Amino acid sequence: MDAQSATPLSTFDKLDPQKRGRVLEESLAEFAEHGYHQASVNRIVGRLGIAKGSLFQYFGSKEGLFRHLFSRALEEIKTPLKAIRDADTGEAFPLRLRRVFVEGAAFARSHPLIWRVYRRMVTQDGFPLREQLLSQVRGEALTYFRELVEGGQTRGEIRPEVDPLAAAFLIEAALDRALTAQDSPLLDAGFGLSSNDESTRRARLAALADMLSRGLMPPTGDTNAPRAHD
């Protein structure tokens, strides 16, 4: 996605912050409820009480509006995850990975509209921009986890023979399934990720992250991996 296509026109930037927030909130709710094709600009502007031409003036088109919403959502989730990866403290890889799982799941639960739009895009073949946007998400996720693994290798926490890209693929796949299971008891299959109890969800997420960490660590590091109940 190029920066220009995801950037609103200057007229939107000049709006009062509260009004900007409401435009984005109502637009996101529309896409989350109806998907892309059935999302109605008329319904959005009707709830906002503005002219249809105003929304097009802000974003150029329905596609421009969706691109902007998607770009904002991506930046929101990337910010805390980058902080975990780039932390220069002595935090070990297992703890970093656990935080990624727990904070990633917390984001999905606290931003249900963003998560619903993403799941619609994953499951609906006819979703416009699907290939382009999902390629971006997957590519950035693999890069993120590869760098996380490589950092662990540099610190001697992960075996040097581990393929960082293969490890990144495995971690991303496990996290994506875990996030999806939060909203689906069927996919959760009794594991506990769809539980209404936050402590149960956190413990199960930590258990997944810890198991992945132990599979990547040197044999002598197994005993140092953090336990899910720590």
Image (cartoon, rainbow, N blue to C red):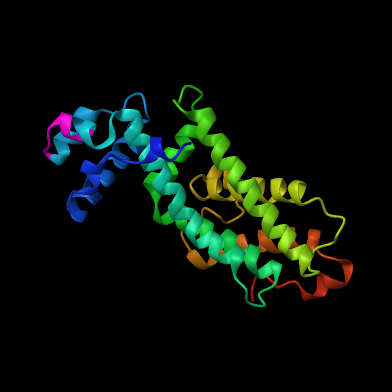
Q: Quadrant of residue 186?
A: top right
Which stretch is magenta? 49-55
Q: Image quadrant for the C terminus?
A: bottom right
Q: Residue at x 84, y 61 (%)?
A: 159
x and y, in percent, of residue 117 in the image: 41, 39
- Left or right: 86 with respect to 194? right
Q: Nearer the viewer, residue 212 or 168?
A: 168
Q: Is residue 34 magenta?
A: no
Q: Residue at x 48, y 47 (%)?
A: 183
Q: Quadrant of residue 100?
A: bottom right
Image vertical order of residue 100 relative to residue 12, above or below: below
- Left or right: 92 with respect to 41? right
Do we see residue 126 in this rendering? yes
x and y, in percent, of residue 156 in the image: 81, 69
Do we see residue 189 in this rendering? no
Label tally: 0
- Left or right: 221 with respect to 97? right
Image vertical order of residue 59 relative to residue 164, above or below: above
Q: Residue at x 55, y 55 (%)?
A: 193
